């Protein structure tokens, strides 16, 4: 199962702190008293949030507009019940912790009209969702999500001009009280304020419903907007469809259901990066068996143009049998679980069953199995939609998984497409990596064979992928869930000298910056995007990144400032891995971190990779070091501009 659920203690109150159901304001306190949510229920429903005794968000209205009325308008509260819940979950694919213990206040507010609103409040987060009991079918025309701050804050947003988007734009940074620009923004979004006060805004549990977008109102807040359900489509290419007409509603769905969670995480940069609310709010797994799901690393041929070279390459490189066997040999040598055959493996992108004339796919799959390496196949979403029988055929062939690309929509129909893919793939024991995709929104807990999503300006974007933007990811994109950034460049450059053309692709940031990404970023599949030839030439770096796990037992954020720098330690079994990176605003950054997360009384050995003395200009310059450490050690970590630091700490 996706997690084991243990209810250790539940303290049930007959009503919210003795509050009468007809009262106009209900106050919800988090278990430790750090957050107070004041819910107004007099005709209109709204909530305000105080954090650490200071009001931060005020009068955020809640309505759900349906063909059976607007829920939340002229509201009449019938009952309100609260409980304190201690809960433990163990994710199938643990990206931060293998065991997550959470204490939260759960409050259920039932209203006349057969609907209720559920709140969950921890000491660092507020989440709510609508639920209805309105029969078998319901049209949802709109949902209001208003977020109104009362203090100056900067919004860090991924903008878009239209609902059709691949979630691959760089962040913009806007003052919340600046005039609105009319653009929309995707989720998650981050608000930063004075004294490292931050608010992360996101959603999860998005099933049979569209993804939410935000629009700034120019007066310190946001309102929600949603794509309507498509009525008619027009094909543009082998991978693209355009919506030519729309329904009047955003969702036609079961009238008896719970709707997506809307949530806000409040706290310091460290606390934002450590949050696990998507797991806490997750629904049970739909799969009876999950032992077959294998997270892991992937050798990927697209970024380097499928062109290994050198004395040991005595064949014409390309999307052919010999090249893919070479990638399999590389993966097997370094213990990688998969190779990915990206666009080019098939004779036609519209036909998922016929390989190109130079590829014996059955032989490649057989060879991979003999080496313990699975084969993952790339497909456009439109080809998948038109050939849903491919999942059965791929299981018969022995394919390990699929990478489904170019969805570029997030209306209800497309959200349901993701689920249909996940379910069909799970039925035939295939893992899934979604590209051209929106950010994770809960499906990966229902179907944990969904190992990752793109929805990010990753390394494949070449010059668009800069540390200035990337250093925000631990605080924004990766908080939503797995992120397929496709790291691993062995040709490293500083931005002012950056040049990159396939097959000699390069990345901005130092060598250690690029190595540290394997510890910093969370994903159930993690690519080694560069050429095997380059990895062989840099074997000590390759052995390190190949050794970094993709699932974790424990995570500790050691240093963090949103968009500036991030240093994290993660444990797998008895070993700890440490990764750090920074932007280019300072020539050198110095940190002193305590290793008090190590077990007391145990001796360890640390092997580290750090920026070399010339890495500020020649980004491939690095040094290695080793030393004995223990629970009381204070470690020095230095990073140059756009630099990084990576290490493994093992018992002696």
Image: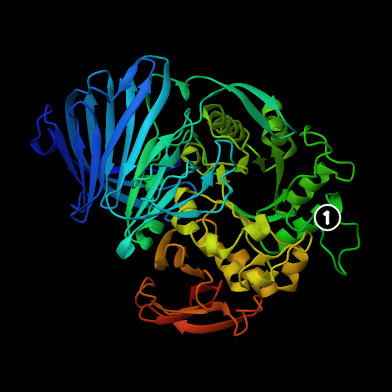
Where residue 307 sits, quadrant-wise, is bottom right
Left or right of 138 on screen, residue 349: right
Dot 1: what SS?
helix
Tally the numbered discs.
1
Image location of residue 202, percent across then percent down: 41, 44
Q: Residue 537: x percent and y percent?
A: 75, 73
Q: Position of residue 288 (x, y in %)?
A: 49, 34
Q: Is residue 37 visible?
A: yes
Front residue (pair 443, 153) = 153
Q: Residue visible at 37% across and 14% down? A: 135
Q: Is residue 543 left or right of residue 43?
A: right
Question: Looking at the image, is 74 positioned above or below residue 642?
Answer: above
Identified at 55% across, 35% down, the residue is 163
Which of the 4 quarters of the picture holds residue 1?
A: top left
> Badge 1: few (under 14), some or many (20 or more) residues near its Cα, within 10 Å?
many
Left or right of 648, for residue 148: left
Per the image, the residue denoted by label 1 is 323
Q: Position of residue 410 (x, y in %)?
A: 54, 34
Left or right of 468 on screen, residue 357: right
Tell me if I can see residue 552 in this picture.
no
Tell me: residue 14, above or below residue 504: above
* Nearest to the observer: residue 92 or residue 585: 585
Which of 312 and 560 lies nearest the eye of the viewer? Answer: 560
Residue closest to the eye, 258 or 590: 590
């Amino acid at each position: 199962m996706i997690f084991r659920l243990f209810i250790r203690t539940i303290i049930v109150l007959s009503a919210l702190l003795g509050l009468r159901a007809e009262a106009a304001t209900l106050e919800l306190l988090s278990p430790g008293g750090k957050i107070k949510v004041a819910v107004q229920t007099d005709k209109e429903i709204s909530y305000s949030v105080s954090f650490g005794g200071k009001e931060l968000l005020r009068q955020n209205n809640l309505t759900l507009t349906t063909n059976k009325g607007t829920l939340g308008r002229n509201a009449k509260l019938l009952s309100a019940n609260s409980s304190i819940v201690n809960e433990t979950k163990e994710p199938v694919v643990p990206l931060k912790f293998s065991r997550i213990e959470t204490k939260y206040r759960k409050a259920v507010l039932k209203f006349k009209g057969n609907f209720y609103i559920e709140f969950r409040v921890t000491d660092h987060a507020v989440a709510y969702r609508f639920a209805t009991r309105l029969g078998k079918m319901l049209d949802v025309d709109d949902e209001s999500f208003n977020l109104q701050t009362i203090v100056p804050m900067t919004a860090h947003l991924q903008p878009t001009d239209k609902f059709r988007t691949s979630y691959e734009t760089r962040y913009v940074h806007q003052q919340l009280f600046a005039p609105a620009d009319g653009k929309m923004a995707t989720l998650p979004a981050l608000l930063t304020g004075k004294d490292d006060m931050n608010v992360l805004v996101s959603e999860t549990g998005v099933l049979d419903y569209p993804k939410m977008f935000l629009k700034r109102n120019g007066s310190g807040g946001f309102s929600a907007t949603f794509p309507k359900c498509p009525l008619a489509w027009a094909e543009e290419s082998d991978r693209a469809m355009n919506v030519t007409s729309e329904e009047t509603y955003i969702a036609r769905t079961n009238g008896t259901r719970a709707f997506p969670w809307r949530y806000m995480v409040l706290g310091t940069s460290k606390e934002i990066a450590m949050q696990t609310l998507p797991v806490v709010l997750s629904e049970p797994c739909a799969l009876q068996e999950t032992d077959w799901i294998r997270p892991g690393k992937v050798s990927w041929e697209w970024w380097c143009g499928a062109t290994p070279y050198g004395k040991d390459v005595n064949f014409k490189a390309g999307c052919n049998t010999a090249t893919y066997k070479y990638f399999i040999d590389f993966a097997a040598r370094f213990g990688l679980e998969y190779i990915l055959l990206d666009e080019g493996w098939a004779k036609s992108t519209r036909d998922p069953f016929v390989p190109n004339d130079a590829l014996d796919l059955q032989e490649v799959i057989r060879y991979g199995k003999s080496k313990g390496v699975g084969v993952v196949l790339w497909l456009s979403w439109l080809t998948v939609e038109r050939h849903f029988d491919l999942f059965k055929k791929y299981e018969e062939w022995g394919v390990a998984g699929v990478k489904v690309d170019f969805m570029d929509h997030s209306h209800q129909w497309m959200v349901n497409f993701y689920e249909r893919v996940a379910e069909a793939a799970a039925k035939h024991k295939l893992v899934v990596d979604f590209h051209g995709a929106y950010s994770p929104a809960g499906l990966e807990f229902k179907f944990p064979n969904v190992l990752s999503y793109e929805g990010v300006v990753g390394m494949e974007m070449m010059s668009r992928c800069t540390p200035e933007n990337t250093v925000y990811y631990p605080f924004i994109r990766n908080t939503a869930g797995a992120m397929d950034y496709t790291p691993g460049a062995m040709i490293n450059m500083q931005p002012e000298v950056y040049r990159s053309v396939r097959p000699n692709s390069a990345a901005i940031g130092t060598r250690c910056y690029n190595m540290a990404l394997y510890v910093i970023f969370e994903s159930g599949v993690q690519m080694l995007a560069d050429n095997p030839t380059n990895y062989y030439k840099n074997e000590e770096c390759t052995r390190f990144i190949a050794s970094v796990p993709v699932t974790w037992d424990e995570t500790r954020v050691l240093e963090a400032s949103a968009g500036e720098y991030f240093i994290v330690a993660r444990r797998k079994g008895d070993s700890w891995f440490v990764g750090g990176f920074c932007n280019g605003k300072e020539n050198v950054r110095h940190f002193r971190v305590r290793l008090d997360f190590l077990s007391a009384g145990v001796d360890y050995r640390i092997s580290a990779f750090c920026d070399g003395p010339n890495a500020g200009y020649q980004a491939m310059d690095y040094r290695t070091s080793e030393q004995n450490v223990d629970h009381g050690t204070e470690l020095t970590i230095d990073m140059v501009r756009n630099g990084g630091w990576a290490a493994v700490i093992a018992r002696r």
